[in-house]
Image (spheres, coloured by chain):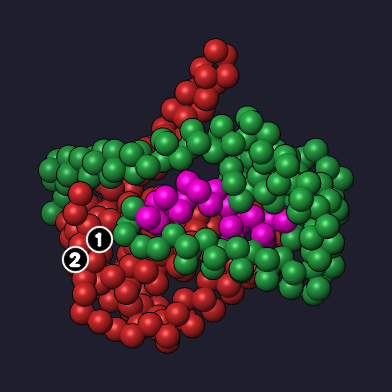
Amino acid sequence: MNAVIDLLINLLSFLWNIAKLLIPIMVIIEIFKDTKLIDKITSIFRPVTNFFTLSEKAGVALLFGMFFGLTIGAGAILQSVKDYDVDKRSVFLVIMFVSLCHAVFEDSFIMAAVGANIAQLLLARFGAAILLTFLLSRFIKKTDDSLKINE
Amino acid sequence: MITTDTFKRGFKNGIVTMIELSKILIPVYIAVQLLSISGIINIIAKFFHPAMSLFGLPGEASLVILLGYFLGTYAALGAMAAFELSAVQVTTIAIMISIAHSLFTESAVVRKLGLSTTASIVARLFFSVLMGFLHFRIFG
């Protein structure tokens, strides 16, 4: 019985940890949109999105995933697909990048706290993510099918 | 222009996305916990024991890495604290589990986007192993 209660408590704290990041970030995204900051971020990220041959608005999802984690990144991607019709190819490439390289601050500081070399860690993650996304972006042809997420 | 409506919309989007993600996160989380409680993860850890020498790691490290792959970074860190490891070994493990962790939970998130979870898992495991191996060869 105690095990079940523990599991439920852990589950709730797990969900709470996501919610307390996700909700503020969704608010931040709305603020970005209303102040046209999203256009600025999009243009700063243009060299990156160009390099990976992504659609422009995918840069925002890439940024959020990279800094805030895969779950948050996925939330941002779901939202950007709804808002901007980001194509499926871009979503796939962003997810592959973010799969290897997400929550870089949070993860890296925790790892550094237990004695890992932070420079080597970041180099390995960014190196792997950039290499993978670059290769995939050259192998996957651009098509018109946009991702529809309908529940 | 930022109005109260901006905050309301953000909050609402947050809740809606949270519910969408929870539909998948909750069942997966419970399943992985059951896998852990039933001891199946321990059997797997024994099996992978010899492979660890490729990364210059002691056998116990397989448990740390598997905990990372299955349960997540925090579980792996908890296990890592129990073993004597050098700075290079800690970094090797950190690289491997930073690239690939919480594979069931996080792949469920990828699935939510309508994408192949296989591609994500294969890429993460491949680069986890590759980067761990390279790190050991270069710095070990």
Residue depicted at 80% across the width and 38% down the height: B82
What's drawn in magenta, residue-wise? Answer: B93-111
Q: Chain letter for red?
A: A
Disc tally is 2
- As displayed, is residue B25 above or below residue A38? above
For the residue marked with disc 2, what is the amino acid? Answer: Tyr
Left or right of A47 on screen, residue A150: left
| Visible residue check, residue A47 | no
SS at mark 2 in the image:
helix
Left or right of A142 on screen, residue A63: right
How far across and down, in percent of the image, does residue B113 sit? 32, 57
Q: Nearer the viewer, residue A129 or B64?
A: B64
The reply to whether the C-beta atoms of the residues labelled 2 and 1 are less than 8 Å apart is: yes
Q: Is residue B127 magenta?
A: no
Q: Chain letter for green?
A: B
Q: Nearer the viewer, residue B109 or A107?
A: B109
Residue B38, image quadrant: top right
Dot 2 crowding, Cα within 10 Å, few <14, some 14–19, many 20+: few
- As displayed, is residue A134 above or below residue B116? below
Identify the residue under disc 2: A84
Q: Nearer the viewer, residue B134 or A111?
A: B134
Q: Badge 1 sits on which subunit?
A: A
User: What's the CA distance linking mark 2 and mark 1?
Assistant: 6 Å
How far across and down, in percent of the image, does residue A58 sit? 31, 69
Dot 1 crowding, Cα within 10 Å, few <14, some 14–19, many 20+: some
Residue depicted at 42% across the width and 87% down the height: A138
Identify the residue under disc 1: A80
Residue A36, image quadrant: bottom left
